[in-house]
Amino acid sequence: MMLSGKNDCKNAYLNIHAGAGGTESCDWTSMLLRMYSRWAERNKYSIGQIDLLPGEEAGIKSVTILVKGSFAYGYLKSEIGVHRLVRISPFDSNSRRHTSFAAVDVIPELDTDIEIEVNEKDLKLDTYRASGAGGQHVNKTSSAVRITHIPTGIIVQCQNDRSQHKNKAMALKMLKSKLYQLKEKEREKELANAYDEKGEIAWGHQIRSYVLQPYTMIKDLRTGKETAKTQSFLDGEIDDFITAYLKWKIGK
């Protein structure tokens, strides 16, 4: 019952985006990427980086990964929303507490043969230089691809390959997955609810709080699930929270 959704068994695209908090939030985004990467390793999932935009001073502004494995989407959909961190800032010389925010979004990877018509006239295609590491070739050529679907405003981008053609193909695949979600009424409703829960990437819209100072506590504001084992949680031991969300979702 917890994993009975039509696309729950699929692989998952997971995007983390830094919110209010500047460099702090970019660092928080990199911490979340590490957390989900460790979780994937623990569950024998494979990870492929699709896109990464580094922060200006430290951390990551935005990152998209593809998590491959049985029911990856079914589990990771519990993470959709704003994640709030409270800690003593490593970037503050006065060692003051700072609050940081990051938004997590998850969509299923759908089959390449799904029946979704994408009109080329509805697409805006931009190319740019890859921002991450990858050798001189990646940095000197505009191999990265960003596609904007004008009717819906959906934006997807990919820079994981040196080939612009391969990056475009991956971006189109992600776009089709997102459009497929919108096409299904039931899935569209779930997506809308997820975004309503996520809201603005700032105070008052978080689904989970991670407090490292002055005490240690991680609490999911939807299910009430909490733990004081913050380090193990940030090391990827999040399964109890995922299960609590799936049970809570059934009872809604």
Image (tube, helix red, strand yellow):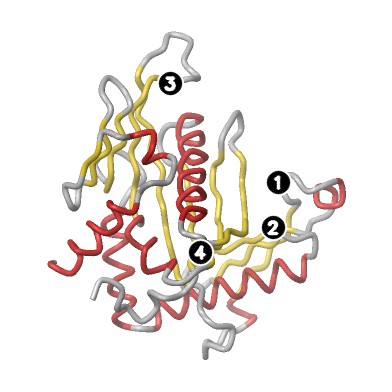
Q: Which residue is mark 1?
A: 131
Q: Nearer the viewer, mark 4 or mark 1?
A: 4
Tell me the quarter of the image containing the N terminus.
Answer: bottom left
Q: Residue at x 43, y 8 (%)?
A: 94
Q: Which residue is mark 2?
A: 159
Give above or below for 203 relative to 47: above
Looking at the image, do the residues carrying marks 2 and 1 touch, with CB atoms under 8 Å apart?
Answer: yes
Q: Residue at x 33, y 69 (%)?
A: 191
Q: Which residue is mark 3?
A: 89
Helix, strand or loop at mark 4? strand
Q: Which residue is mark 4?
A: 13
Mark 1 residue type: Ser
Q: CA distance from mark 2 to mark 3?
A: 31 Å
User: Where in the figure is residue 42, as x and y percent of width and height?
Assistant: 47, 53
Which numbered disc, 2 or 3, marks the residue that appears first in the sequence? 3
Which numbered disc, 1 or 3, marks the residue that appears first in the sequence? 3
Mark 3 residue type: Ser
Q: Residue at x 64, y 62 (%)?
A: 146
Q: CA distance from mark 4 to mark 1?
A: 20 Å
Which numbered disc, 4 or 1, marks the residue that appears first in the sequence? 4
- Among all residues in the image, which is located at the extreme left? 251
Mark 2 residue type: Gln
Q: CA distance from mark 3 to mark 4?
A: 30 Å
Looking at the image, do the residues carrying marks 2 and 4 touch, with CB atoms under 8 Å apart?
Answer: no
